[in-house]
Image: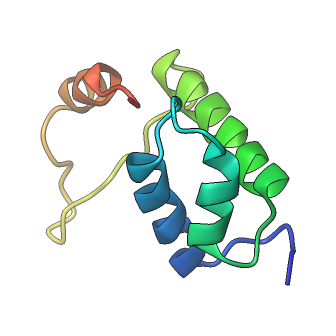
Amino acid sequence: MSSSSWTAKQNKAFEKALALYDKDTPDRWYNVAKAVGGKTPEEVKRHYELLVQDVKHIESGQVPFPNYRTTGGSSYGNTSENEKRMRDLKLQ
């Protein structure tokens, strides 16, 4: 089974596999694909490349932060503080 859509279970397995098989791991994408299941090495590599692109867009401020609300309807904290915190996070 190989398809372009990813299940939540596959995404979670993908995240765990990325932590386990870093950029210096031989046959990294083969190992990640095996851990995810139902995906080819090419598909997991493309999924990773898209993730990196998304993170770069977020870090460069090209993606607006959602205006989350608490159950009381008021904004949680100062949006600019939340944005700063998110920009300080880096994908390793």
Name the residue nearer the viewer: 16 or 90. Answer: 16
* Residue located at (47% from left, 47% from top): 21
Residue 72 occupies which quadrant of the picture?
bottom left
For residue 4, above or below residue 75 = below
Name the residue nearer the viewer: 81 or 30. Answer: 30
The residue lying furthest to the top in this view is 60
Does residue 10 appear left or right of residue 43 in this picture?
Answer: left
The residue lying furthest to the bottom in this view is 1
Quarter of the image with the N terminus is bottom right
The residue lying furthest to the front in this view is 26
Quarter of the image with the C terminus is top left
Rendered location of residue 20, percent (x, y): 40, 51
Does residue 31 appear left or right of residue 86 in this picture?
Answer: right
For residue 30, above or below residue 71 = above
Rendered location of residue 42, percent (x, y): 83, 50
* Residue located at (80% from left, 56% from top): 43
Rendered location of residue 54, percent (x, y): 61, 35
Does residue 1 appear left or right of residue 83 in this picture?
Answer: right
Rendered location of residue 91, percent (x, y): 41, 31
Residue 45 occupies which quadrant of the picture?
top right
For residue 9, above or below residue 13 = below
* Residue located at (48% from left, 49% from top): 18
Name the residue nearer the viewer: 51 or 17. Answer: 17
